[in-house]
Image (cartoon, coloured by chain):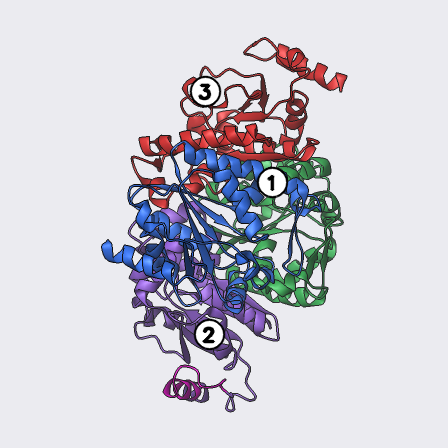
Chain colours: A blue, B red, C green, D purple
């Protein structure tokens, strides 16, 4: 356990964005929300499931996909809602943003009510997206995790999955991390989801 | 619009559970949450999608399935979590109940934050299940809708779907409505989802 | 059994397309392939599953969807392949037709090899589509079943399903039956899949 | 055939993938069927989709899953059919074997009719399973590809997927390759599907 935390500490110290490590302070605290941010096909959902499998308590996993499935079909194909262009670009309109804000408030409330939550997100707006979540999550103990994956590798996995618009992985791989501040980053380019999960779990 | 409300009034007056119709009082109010309660394969999800299609504003649709997919895989097959027995019985344990309570609190918060929500639920505990939702939804304007379907017909649809444990439809058809109080009831035994939706929409 | 065949006979006699009923001749024969033809959202897949559930022997169910999933992703969105236009129109190109011809030959061979097969099809070309199947199925004993559904009702179910391009149901409801010859027709407009299945099973 | 095996040997002797195989000996021949054999979660489907994406002609992809979905629901849970035990063991009964034999005959016929086919298979019986396919495919030009993956890694991916019975990956990782003869083997333990695909495509 000590070793695990140490490893986590190390990876934080050498993290590009040297945010003051909160591992030490977290001793008595309990992480309430884990936010996994990464581009499409970077492996977030797989890591979320592995985390659910290895963490001792039951954690709920929600994600952008949960919201996209919850909106009306018409909202999924309108300029005001969310559009998935044929080249992989995702354009988010004001209507979707409004629904998303309410949904994020709901996630925060679920956590305040006692459920531990893993959020699987795609910060299309980079730091601005993170700020929205920070504002909503407020005083909750959050572990911010960047899920990196080389764009070309993610694009290959997108082809292998066969259920995503081709182009999303490549276009999102870098932009979603723009100016985002993390407690921890994992990289799935050469590391399996089940190997990334313990590094994250060690910081919870 | 007047006609629509009148139709709604009529259908309420002739509703089996003659709860005083709240349509008139609702004049200045706006429904914030529509709760659709019914057994498995009674057609709730289809009605939810039709409501999303015909209501002028965008409504988010969440349901029991959203929660079941969010819990850890291990919780979906444990006595403490939620078990789907091979005869169609669904047994809910304390761990699942705790997560569910937090999830319901989140739905309430999402509605308080401005999103309109359709909840697709299965009140396995009848009135007790409704009470949990009532407590959580508090002062929100809720439209309680019973989605009835003859047990044998629902069982037939369960076979036709091919993706549910056989037996759920029959075992839930009646019990989920036990002592539940509704503003409106629809019956999908002989009525299509798209025909049920306007009756509900007229009361929103 | 006699009663069942009689019922089948009756339904054939009153069938719109009064093809000479082959039920009587079929006495010693065994149906090897059941072809269900109908527009999108007419309920073919549900009937296929119900048939599998009530027929004493195990039947394999394949359909247009099986083929669409088997072709390359690129073929699903090209003029040469198969295109699903945003208005619900489905345009089939020469590349898809070639693959389809081979696939149909495979279905015939599977039946010749002893497996009983239910095919769930959409005869976009009406009689010409049926002719392709007839040529391929050759001497196999085939039961041709028309699955009718009022276009408006099918369109409503399309909205309720939420996973199909809106417009397919309405545009296909009539055209797929154009000049097609059936042994039996069922209509799901007011009849459940599980009720249609026995009428078909009685003719097998 | 000898040539193909020789090439395979060459490609084995010279590390994993020194350069794309030149297929000198196959000149006049054209591969008609690619059989990918590997345990659950070894990455076969992903490789199949990548092959479809990079091969110049359209290839149809079918697999064990296609057959499992085609059999009656009751066959998926009976001793005579196919059973997925809770520990990941898959038990195949005589009824399923009979249907499978007919299905394999259909795949062969589809290839004889001109469609190129990628088969994604799990040889639970090792060499005996391959023999069944060899008998059915007869004179067709087949490329036999072993899809290897370290059992522990495959088990991790099984957890990350979240849609398979836990235990299948580990129990199948080795046994499916028992005495099976390949033209080519790929290993997804450290290699992406999109990287494995060109090595296979080069031998087609």
Q: Residue at x 63, y 65 (%)?
A: C74
In the picture, the disc for residue D196 is 2
Mark 2 burial class by Cα count in 10 Å: few <14, some 14-19, many 20+: many
CA gap between label 3 and label 1 equals 32 Å
Left or right: residue C15 versus residue A57 is right
- Mark 1 residue element: helix
Q: Are marks 3 and 1 on the same chain?
A: no
Which residue is at the front of the view, A77 or D127? Answer: A77
Disc marking residue B135: 3
The quadrant of the rendering that contains the N terminus of chain B is top right
Query: Mark 3, mark 1: which one is toward the viewer?
Result: 3
Residue B95 in the image: x percent, y percent? 33, 34
Task: Give the extent of the magenta segment.
Answer: D7-21
**Helix, strand, or loop for circle 3?**
helix
Disc 3 residue crowd, few under 14, some 14–19, many 20+, Cα 10 Å = few
The x, y position of residue C135, in whole percent, is 66, 62
Determine whether label 3 and label 2 are within 8 Å by CB. Answer: no
Q: Is residue B198 left or right of residue B106?
A: right
Q: On residue D67, which mark appears? A: none
Image: B111 above or below D148? above
Instruction: Give how far apart the Cα atoms at labels 3 and 2 are.
Output: 56 Å
């Amino acid at each position: 356990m000590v070793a695990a935390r140490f490893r986590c500490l190390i990876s934080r110290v050498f993290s590009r964005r040297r945010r003051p490590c909160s591992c030490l302070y977290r001793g008595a605290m309990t992480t309430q929300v884990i936010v996994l941010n990464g581009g499409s096909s970077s492996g977030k959902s797989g890591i979320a499931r592995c985390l659910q499998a290895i963490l001792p308590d039951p954690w709920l996993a929600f994600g952008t996909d949960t919201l996209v499935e919850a909106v009306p079909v018409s909202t999924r194909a309108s300029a005001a809602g969310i559009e998935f262009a044929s080249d992989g670009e995702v354009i988010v309109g004001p209507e979707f943003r409004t629904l998303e804000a309410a949904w994020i408030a709901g996630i925060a409330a679920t956590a305040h009510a006692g459920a531990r939550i893993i959020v699987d997100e795609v910060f299309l707006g980079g730091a601005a997206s993170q700020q929205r979540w920070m504002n909503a999550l407020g005083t909750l103990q959050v572990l911010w995790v960047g899920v990196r994956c080389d764009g070309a590798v993610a694009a290959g996995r997108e082809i292998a999955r066969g259920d995503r618009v081709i182009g999303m992985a490549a276009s999102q791989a870098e932009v979603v991390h723009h100016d985002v501040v993390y407690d921890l980053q994992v990289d799935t380019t050469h590391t399996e989801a089940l190997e990334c999960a313990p590094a994250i779990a060690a910081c919870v």
